[in-house]
Amino acid sequence: MSIEQILGLCTGLAFGFLLQKGRVLRYDKQVNAMLFKDMTIFKFMLSAIIVGMFGILALNDLKLIQLSHKAMNMGGILVGGALFGAGWAVMGFCPGTSVGAVGEGRWHALFGVVGMVVGAGIYAELYPTFKTTVLSWGDFGKIGLPGALGINHWIVALIFTAITLLLFRWFEKKGL
Amino acid sequence: MSAQLNKAQRDGWSPYLAGALVGLLAILSVYLTTTLMGKSNYLGASTTFVRAAGLVFQNLDAAHVAQNAYYAKEKVKIDWQFLMVIGIFFGALLSSVTDKSFKLEGVPPVWQQRFGPSVIKRAIFAFLGGIVAMIGARLADGCPSGHGLSGMMQLSVSSFVAMAMFFGFGALVAHFMYTRGA
């Protein structure tokens, strides 16, 4: 195994361990979030985002890492986002959690995993068509929120953190 | 004491704590991949399914996969992210076996309550949902890991919009499935 693969495996082991400890690998947690009954996955995701954001912005300021924005392709993000959301609700797992769910014994997630491999194969076949249709509807490029708004990234980060903390308080108040 | 232990086994860790630790893991991981591999890698999962599809379909028609523009773009290889996804499986296995929350389950409880105990019915929907979700994730160029976690951490415009679409349409379809006629 290469150093790249060993690093990937170790990162995944820790990631899977923490996803399982947060109990976010469950079908019930994911679907109940979409039904606004249990916000566990949002508590988990937003906590990760807030902590990760400060570290990544700092490392980027120090030029120790590079940011890697994904392109704001209108068709891809809007149509793809809608399709993903619909499939996510039916399958009850996202790509990362499906694999972890199988790891904690929820073997029905395996059908979702197989479906996603087939879906990736279908996408590869349809790629030339998507490229000239949905993906050609307008591309704003690899942009960040601070640049788009013209506001310093630390201020955006603080505003985002404040909104998240208010959201957390509301979740706890409502017992979600 | 044993009641407390059972509760800990059932509930795991606080999602705030486990999530915050994933944030630290994300920082460490970006730093280490940059230092050791020369390229900043962010947590993500869905590209691995393209590579897995390439590896599977290579067995059926190697020439076809070699000619496909999308496999050429994403490169069919067992890379950092591929091993990370495999690691998620073993990490979840390790965590659930050691805290005794590992459980073989063929139909999730919420699904069973609404759609019955049929494993085949659940399997068909999970399979079809998986196909639709992955086509969507590839169009959007990311999933709740790549966009939801990694993209939002970097304050990417595309990721905020993508995550809103993921959850918005997820909520719409989930409400249609679970509250219609109930």
Image (cartoon, rainbow, N blue to C red):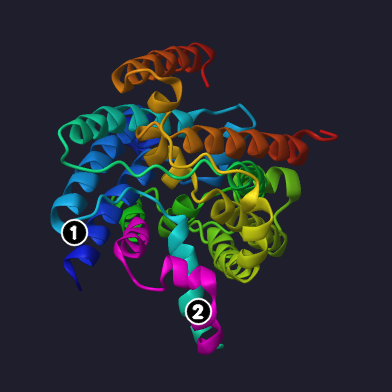
Answer with the quarter of the image where residue B11 lies.
top left
**Residue named by callout 2:** B56
- For the record, the magenta segment spans B62-89
> Residue, x 29% and y 33% (percent of image)?
A52
Answer with the quarter of the image where residue A154 lies.
top left
| Subunit that carries the residue with mark 1 | B
Secondary structure of the residue carrying tag 2 is: helix
| Badge 2 amino acid | Val
> Residue, x 18% and y 45% (percent of image)?
B31
Tell me the mark number nearer the camera, choosing from 1 and 2: 1
**Horizontal and vertical percent for residue B27?**
23, 39
| Badge 1 amino acid | Met
Question: Left or right of A163: which side holds A60?
Answer: left
| Subunit that carries the residue with mark 2 | B
Q: Residue B37 carries which label?
A: 1
Q: Who is closer to the viewer here, B12 or A22? A: A22
Discs 1 and 2 carry the same chain letter: yes
> Residue, x 71% and y 35% (percent of image)?
B172
Q: Which mark is residue A125?
A: none
User: Relative to A62, does residue A13 appear above or below in the rendering?
Assistant: below
Q: Who is closer to the viewer here, A62 or A53? A: A62
